[in-house]
């Protein structure tokens, strides 16, 4: 996994580079946006993290430019500006997510993983979540490198959970997605699929957590 | 400074006032010229018409009437005398009823002039492109009833016009004098009257930017005083909000100083500790840093809520969506603290600012999670209460808030346990601020279980028409 970080504060940058390196993410660091345009053309990065308040070219301007060139690179904004306008503008221009400083390393790692997972779902059609590997094109799944035997409806539920992790997926959304290719499915039916999936995922290191009253979340133990 | 610039221009007001006054005055002057001339003409006519009538009487006395007809005794010297005038040309004609001209000018007799049945009447007419005044004397001689006769005497109107013009000019002079006086009184009077405004604007312009003391009202006119009141009221509000900001900044700095001191001390100690103790210090350092991070985030949220407040953009916000989002945001914190975080949401829409309401909900959940212990429950609910009023509530079964502290928990930087370092002391202030901006009411209750606290935010009931206002 190779990431690019645009951050002008050396202390912050050093912390991020070192922290992400420990979880196996290689990070190239640049202090301004100008050389970054060349860098993303030469290297095949998985994601770029952009600080908005950069010297010279602004972070927002950089994002706008790479989106104009139709580069489908996931962009995560890291900023101390927490004005709503900045947030909305960043996402409008084409950033994929937004993380407010100060943040904790585990949060940053989780966001990066989620973004890469989502982008690979659209480009590579293969998504991994810990020991779980999902092929979206073939609609097959492997768990701990073994074929996972699941029904189409279970597959649909699990796909939803994987693509939205680490966010919570509401029971209603799961019911809606099942209803789209079947008759109306009640939220009670969702519970049945979830409990079946739990049985199949047992002792694999992947866990479906119930969030009382709202839905489920896929987690790694 | 913009303020003073726009007020140091009293002259435009003066020009406007003079302009507005001079237009009706000039119209009045025009009307006066016309009516004065007409009046002068009336006076002149009254005087000179009598002379025309006298001439007609002279001609009548010279008529010689008998059964055969009418004759007139009019030697040429008499004719000359009758026609002599310093300025005007005089015409006359003696005409019988059948139209026969006995004597005088045929052109005059040919004019179609209406006249009274008997006696004298006067008319204006045109002869040879000159305006004339005609006196028509119609009479039937007593000794000859067969011949009703008409005597016309006319003259051009030069001396009448002269007389009317003289009358008009005399009054014109007094009119012009009156207008000039009124305009100059206004022109110079306005400057004099507005002088206090000039002084006032200079006074304000000269002030220091932080001088918000009221402007003295002594010696000002009744017309200016409302302006002064408004300015002073505005300055008082400004002063109060500036003082509130000042108080907030200083207490914020104080609040930040505490975790910063902890951070510094722990770092110093860590630097001097043997390597195996450093790790223990790091935990304390981490907590101080987290506290500072949380505190700055809260202070910014509060500052933004109070700044944005006045110009808040309202949109329709689905509260259950906020709950879904909060579930993702807080589930990790709940798992970490081994707290059972649950939700119960009915779809309900509130008109408000999405990020502010998110901030409100986040602070309620954050508070609940911070002040409950291992194994406790926190439940977040939204829906509609009585009267279709939307509500949002967060319930926990933690230690609760003592009765006596319930009013104070909404104050900034208030903590129930003063030694506590758990929260920022700003969470409920943010909740209160945001609720106030949404005209919502925040109340504290004890849950039915008897322990813990239930914070409920009641939004105003939705109007029956859901159209956006």
Image (cartoon, grey):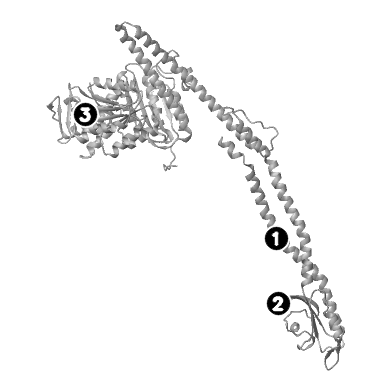
Q: Residues within 10 Å of mark 3 (few under 14, many from 20)?
A: some
Q: In front here: B424 or B188?
A: B188
Q: Nearer the viewer, mark 2 or mark 3?
A: 2
Chain on which label 1 sits? B
Q: Is residue A127 visible?
A: yes
Give x and y (percent) for residue B122. Answer: 78, 75
Q: Is residue A6 above or below residue B70?
A: above
Quadrant that contains the N terminus of chain A: top left
Question: Which quadrant of the structure image shows residue A21?
Answer: top left
Q: Is residue B448 visible?
A: no
Q: Is residue A21 above or below residue B222?
A: above
Q: Tell me, for residue B129, which label it has, or none.
A: 2
Q: Which residue is depicted at the point 40% across and 12% down?
A: B264
Give x and y (percent) for residue B162. Answer: 78, 68
Q: Which residue is depicted at the point 80% across and 69% down?
A: B44
Q: Nearer the viewer, mark 3 or mark 1?
A: 1
Give x and y (percent) for residue B188. Answer: 71, 45
Distance, label 2 to label 3, CA atoms, is 116 Å
> Could you tell me which secondary element the residue under label 2 belongs to?
loop
Q: In this figure, which residue is indicated by the disc labeled 3?
A: A194
Q: In this figure, which residue is indicated by the disc labeled 1?
A: B30
Q: In front here: B348 or B171?
A: B171
Question: Which quadrant of the structure image shows residue B327?
Answer: top left
**From the viewer's perspective, is B10 left or right of A5?**
right
């Amino acid at each position: 996994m190779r990431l690019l970080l645009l951050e002008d504060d050396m202390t912050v940058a050093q912390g991020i580079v070192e922290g992400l390196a420990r979880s196996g993410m290689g990070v190239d660091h640049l202090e301004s946006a100008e050389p970054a345009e060349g860098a993303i053309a030469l290297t095949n990065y998985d994601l770029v993290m952009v600080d908005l308040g950069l010297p010279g070219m602004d972070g927002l301007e950089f994002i706008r430019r790479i989106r104009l060139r139709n580069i489908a690179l996931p962009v995560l904004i890291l900023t101390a500006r927490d004005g709503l306008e900045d947030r909305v503008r960043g996402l409008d221009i084409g950033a994929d997510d937004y993380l407010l400083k100060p943040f904790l390393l585990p949060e940053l790692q989780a966001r990066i993983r989620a973004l890469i997972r989502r982008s690979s779902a659209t480009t590579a059609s293969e998504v991994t979540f810990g020991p779980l590997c999902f092929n979206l094109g073939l609609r097959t799944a492997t768990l701990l490198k073994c074929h996972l035997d699941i029904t189409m409806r279970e597959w649909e539920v699990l796909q939803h959970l994987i693509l939205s992790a680490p966010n919570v997926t509401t029971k209603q959304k799961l019911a809606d997605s099942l209803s789209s290719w079947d008759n109306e499915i009640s939220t009670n039916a969702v519970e049945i699929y979830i409990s079946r999936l739990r049985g199949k995922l047992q002792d694999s290191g992947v866990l479906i957590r119930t969030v009382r009253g709202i839905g489920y979340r896929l987690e790694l133990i | 400074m913009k303020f003073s610039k726009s007020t140091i221009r009293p002259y435009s007001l003066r020009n406007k006032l003079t302009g507005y006054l001079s237009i009706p005055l000039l119209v009045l002057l025009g009307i006066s010229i016309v009516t004065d001339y007409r009046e002068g003409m009336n006076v002149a006519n009254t005087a000179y018409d009598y002379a025309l009538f006298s001439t007609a009487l002279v001609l009548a006395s010279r008529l010689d009437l008998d059964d055969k007809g009418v004759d007139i005794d009019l030697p040429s010297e008499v004719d000359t005398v009758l026609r002599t005038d310093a300025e005007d040309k005089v015409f006359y004609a003696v005409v019988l009823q059948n139209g026969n001209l006995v004597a005088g000018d045929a052109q005059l007799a040919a004019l179609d002039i209406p006249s009274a049945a008997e006696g004298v009447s006067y008319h204006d007419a045109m002869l040879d492109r000159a305006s004339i005044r005609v006196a028509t004397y119609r009479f039937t001689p007593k000794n000859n009833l067969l011949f009703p006769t008409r005597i016309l005497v006319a003259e051009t109107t030069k001396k009448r016009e002269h007389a009317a013009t003289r009358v008009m000019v005399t009054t014109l002079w007094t009119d012009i004098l009156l207008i000039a006086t009124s305009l100059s009184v206004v022109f110079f009077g306005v400057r004099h009257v507005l002088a206090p405004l000039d002084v006032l604007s200079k006074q304000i312009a000269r002030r220091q930017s932080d001088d918000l003391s009221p402007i003295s009202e002594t010696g000002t006119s009744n017309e200016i005083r409302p302006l002064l009141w408004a300015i002073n009221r505005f300055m008082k509000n400004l002063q109060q909000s500036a003082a509130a900001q000042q108080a907030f900044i200083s207490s914020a700095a104080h609040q930040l100083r505490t975790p910063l001191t902890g951070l510094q001390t722990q770092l110093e100690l860590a630097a001097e500790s043997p390597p195996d103790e450093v790790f223990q210090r790091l935990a304390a350092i981490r907590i101080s840093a987290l506290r500072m991070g949380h505190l700055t985030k809260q202070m910014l949220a509060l500052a933004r809520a109070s700044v944005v407040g006045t110009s808040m953009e309202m949109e329709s916000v689905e509260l259950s969506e906020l709950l879904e989002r909060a579930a993702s945001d807080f589930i990790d914190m709940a798992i970490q603290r081994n707290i059972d975080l649950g939700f119960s949401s009915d779809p309900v829409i509130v008109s408000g600012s999405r990020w502010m309401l998110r901030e409100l909900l986040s602070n309620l959940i954050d508070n609940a999670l911070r002040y409950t212990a291992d194994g406790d429950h926190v439940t977040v609910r939204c829906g509609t209460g009585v009267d279709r009023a939307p509500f949002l509530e967060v319930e926990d079964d933690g230690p609760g808030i003592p009765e006596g502290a319930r009013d104070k928990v909404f104050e900034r930087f208030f903590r129930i346990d003063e030694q506590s370092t758990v929260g920022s002391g700003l969470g409920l202030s943010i909740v209160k601020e945001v609720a106030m901006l949404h005209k919502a009411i925040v109340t504290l209750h004890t849950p039915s279980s008897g322990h813990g606290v239930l914070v409920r935010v009641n939004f105003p009931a939705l109007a029956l028409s859901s159209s956006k206002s």
